[in-house]
Image (cartoon, helix red, strand yellow):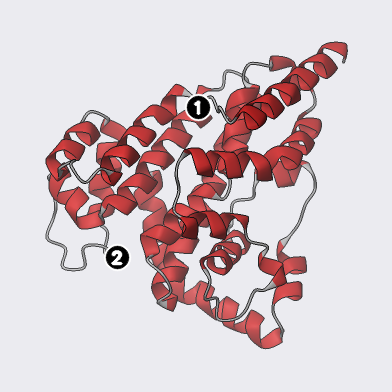
Amino acid sequence: MEEFESQTEAFAQQIEEELRDGVLSFPTVFDLSLRIKKMADDPDSSLSDIAEVVRAEPVLAAKVLRMANTVALNPYRGEINSVGDAIGRIGLSALRCLAYAVAAEQLARDHRSRQMRLVASGLWMHSIDVASWAFAFSRHLGRHTPDTALLAGLMINVGQFYLLARAARYPAIEGDMKRFAEIVSLWDDPVRSAVLDAFEMPALIVDACEADPVAHTEWPPAAMGDIVFFATLAAETPNPFESLLGVQRRPELLDASLGEAGKEAFDALLVTARDTRQEMLAAVCG
């Protein structure tokens, strides 16, 4: 227990210093994600330049091809076999999403501790679940760009991924996973804000991730933050940190946000959007 307390204190001090100094230390698995984002944002980068980088990462290349051949993005079913053509089909915004998803998936597998690996894998699956619902809701409601909603859904838990990555240096923390979940809950918001800033995310994504949806949620959801909020309620894979803390949010937040008519409309949207969600989930996970 003494070692746990010592490492927990050192971990908290490290995070506090990184936030104060504005210098975050990203795991190497995020290098590709950041590189692709910078290239996508650079007007001097050509599609062939970006495709060359993507082809060097087989997992990402496979996911790009799979997404490009989904019904949602390729309704005429003319098979796309080229990474360059696939990027042209899905767009650079969706490519950013996939690059981040691949990085998060690799991070989830990097943990040597079985407990941490299970939590990281659970968080990755929850994030992909939320993002896929956000994509589907955006498409079916005709609000915002679906791939932007996908990215917002992925980024909602980016602070938790960062904390998981940094905790790998402190193996004693896994001795009390509930306490670790409490620490993550405490640092989640400021770390997420710092990571979003470091990633230079657009204001629309930042606002969506930092919004207090219960304070202003309306039906049908119009703001990106509302779409992501309902996506978190629709997610069928729980956030492992919330599970560790015994948090059951859906009934309480639905009651607080919607009247009876709104809940019925929400349930109807779940039915309508489910196939799109399933297809996007398969594209990102497969």
Q: Earlier in the sequence, mark 1 or mark 2?
A: 1
Report x, y in % for residue 187: 71, 38
Crowdedness of circle 1 by 10 Å Cα count: few (<14), some, many (20+)? some
Report x, y in % for residue 28: 44, 22
134 displayed left or right of 160: left
Q: Kindly identify the amino acid type of the residue bearing the numbered disc 1.
A: Phe
Viewport quadrant of the C terminus: top left
Q: Secondary structure at mark 1?
A: loop
Q: Kindly identify the amino acid type of the residue bearing the numbered disc 2.
A: Ala
Residue at (34, 31) in percent of width and height: 32
Q: Is residue 275 above or below residue 66?
A: below
Q: Which mark is residue 249?
A: none
118 displayed left or right of 286: right
Name the residue that disc number 1 marks.
26
Q: Which mark is residue 72?
A: 2
Report x, y in % for residue 90: 25, 55
Q: Is residue 129 above or below residue 39?
A: below
Separation of disc 1 and disc 2 at Cα? 33 Å
Name which quarter of the figure residue 259 lies in: bottom right
